[in-house]
Image: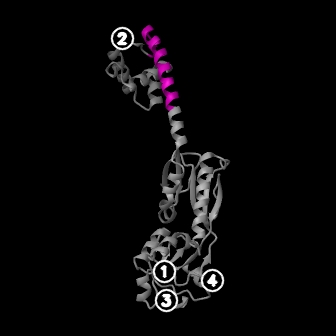
Amino acid sequence: MADQLPPLQTLRAFEAAARRLSMTLAAEEMHLTHGAVSRQIKTLEDHLGVQLFRRMTRRIELTDAGATFFGVVTRLLSELARETESLRQRNDEARLVINSGVSFASKWLTSRLHRLMARYPDFDIHLEVTDAPVDFAVGQVDVALRYGAGNYPFAAAERIMNETVFPVCAPDYRKRIGGLLSPADLANCRLIHEVGMTTTWERWFTWMELPYPKTRGPGYSHGSMSIEAAIRGEGVALGRSVLVAEDLAAGRLVAPFQRAGLQVEWGYDLVYRAGNQDGQKVRAFRSWLVDEVREFMSAGSLA
């Protein structure tokens, strides 16, 4: 049966040309050249063994066979388009697209997603990882997790976690520099910087009423990268409590002065399309996220 059917592209070219009665306009609509549309229609005519158009100097007309075939093709393509859209909508209902910032995804979210999948087995979970702003007016993102001040144009947001920052380093690094007995000892350390972080080492030292040593040290564009650098023993990072919790629990990092945690203005927000707070996917994800955050905080993970 498949061998008896003409190529779909030739049907689309025929439908456009017959509807517009112009191969030029059909070509513009399909983003093809006039010659490409003409060749596809000639291929269709050869396949059918009939002439579909009368080609005149400045216009084309449908033949009787072409007019009859046009009605059939229009009906079938319309039905195909409707069924395609129906299938796409059903697929969209089953897909939960989560967009997360890089550091939060790698240090907190991904290790917990298996519980989201177990809780909602009918959802196909898709995770997009990027720090770029999310435009809910385009694309397929259902919910986003962002680190920021809580202001997201044209979107609604709920704060899910605040955090503090405090010095962290690898256990071996602390031994090499003599134990870090007091915050003042950090003046003798290599400091690891998170580039773009609003709460900087200078601000932390000022809050501790200590002179800022301005020692040289590497800078990383993401908090997860600065944490990994600290784990490798490159120096002392200003750890964000949410991101370093699992590494502290596993012993990959130590926090000599964890009680000297500076509360930061930024935090982690659940972000979604404005007016969609009661949408099925938002409600399901929020419910799971609230439980995860509650367990995380009750375990004493936050400073």
User: Foreground: 146 or 200?
Assistant: 146
Judge left or right: residue 174 versus residue 48. Answer: right
Disc 1 residue type (three-letter): Val
Q: Quadrant of residue 299?
A: bottom right
The residue sitting at 45% across, 70% down in the picture is 225
Disc 2 residue type (three-letter): Val
Q: CA distance from mark 4 to mark 3?
A: 18 Å
Q: Answer with mark 4 or mark 3, whichever residue precedes in sequence.
A: 3
Q: CA distance from mark 3 to mark 1?
A: 11 Å
Farthest residue to the top: give it: 64
Q: Which of the two marks, 3 or 1, is nearer to us in this view?
A: 1
Q: CA distance from mark 4 to mark 2?
A: 85 Å
The residue sitting at 33% across, 17% down in the picture is 47
Q: Main secondary structure of the magenta part?
A: helix
Inspect the magenta stretch and tell me whether residue 35 lies in it: no
Inspect the magenta stretch and tell me whether residue 74 lies in it: yes
Q: Answer with mark 2 or mark 3, whichever residue precedes in sequence.
A: 2
- Circle 4 residue: 207
Q: Answer with mark 3 or mark 1, whichever residue precedes in sequence.
A: 3
- Circle 2 residue: 50
- Circle 1 residue: 254
Label 4 SS: helix
Span highlighted in magenta in the image? 58-84
In contact (CB < 8 Å): disc 4 and disc 3 = no
Disc 3 residue type (three-letter): Leu
Q: Does 177 appear above or below 296?
A: below
Q: Answer with mark 4 or mark 1, whichever residue precedes in sequence.
A: 4
